[in-house]
Image (tube, rainbow, N blue to C red):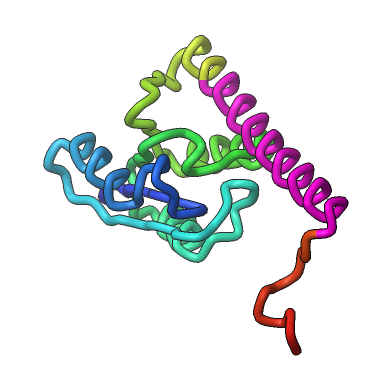
Amino acid sequence: MYDAIYARQSVDKKDSISIESQISFCEHETRGNEFKTYSDKGYSGKNLDRPDFEKLMEDIQQGLIKRVIVYKLDRISRSILDFSGLMIFFEKHGVEFVSVTEKFDTSTPVGRAMLNICIVFAQLERETIQQRVSDAYHTRSKKGYYMGRASSLWI
């Protein structure tokens, strides 16, 4: 059995932490134990449909993983429903969940409550971003800006 480091980055922006940096932070948490890295670049945390995440889940089912380590809670999911299901899945398979930047002891009621509070805010952040993007598109289209792909503009 080994530790699993999972990293995800939906978009590559200056102010976002790269997958490589996330992995580097997580490696410290392995404390020299054997680990395997899973990463999904260009995938949102709004759902669990991510190729390397699916490989991670298969390895958990096969009994290969003892801990899943992430840089931050929202790297694994930004959905309350998905995250709750993940925690049940991890518990069923005896897998510990570790967030490097948010220290939770999921063996205590207070630790589990804090974890759930954080996932609520991760989902709120995702929904707020969606609303902001939608509002920006709406405003730009009302001003007459072209909202399609630039490559099809002159076809």
Residue 16 drawn in magenta: no
Quarter of the figure that contains the C terminus: bottom right
Give the residue drawn at x 78%, y 60%: 145
Give the residue drawn at x 77%, y 51%: 137
Using the image, determine if residue 23 lies above or below residue 122: below
Residue 68 screen position, x and y as percent: 37, 42
Q: Which residues are magenta?
A: 115-144
Pick whichever, 99 or 58, lies toward us: 99
Answer with left or right where residue 112 lies relative to residue 4.
right
Residue 133 drawn in magenta: yes
Give the residue drawn at x 52%, y 22%: 115
Pick whichever, 82 or 75, lies toward us: 75
Q: Quadrant of residue 83?
A: top right
Residue 92 screen position, x and y as percent: 52, 40
Residue 15 screen position, x and y as percent: 41, 40
Answer with left or right where residue 78 lies relative to residue 52.
right
| Identity of the residue furthest to the bottom in this view | 155
Residue 78 screen position, x and y as percent: 60, 39
Using the image, determine if residue 85 lies above or below residue 57: above
Answer with left or right where residue 55 lies relative to residue 127.
left
Give the residue drawn at x 18%, y 37%: 28
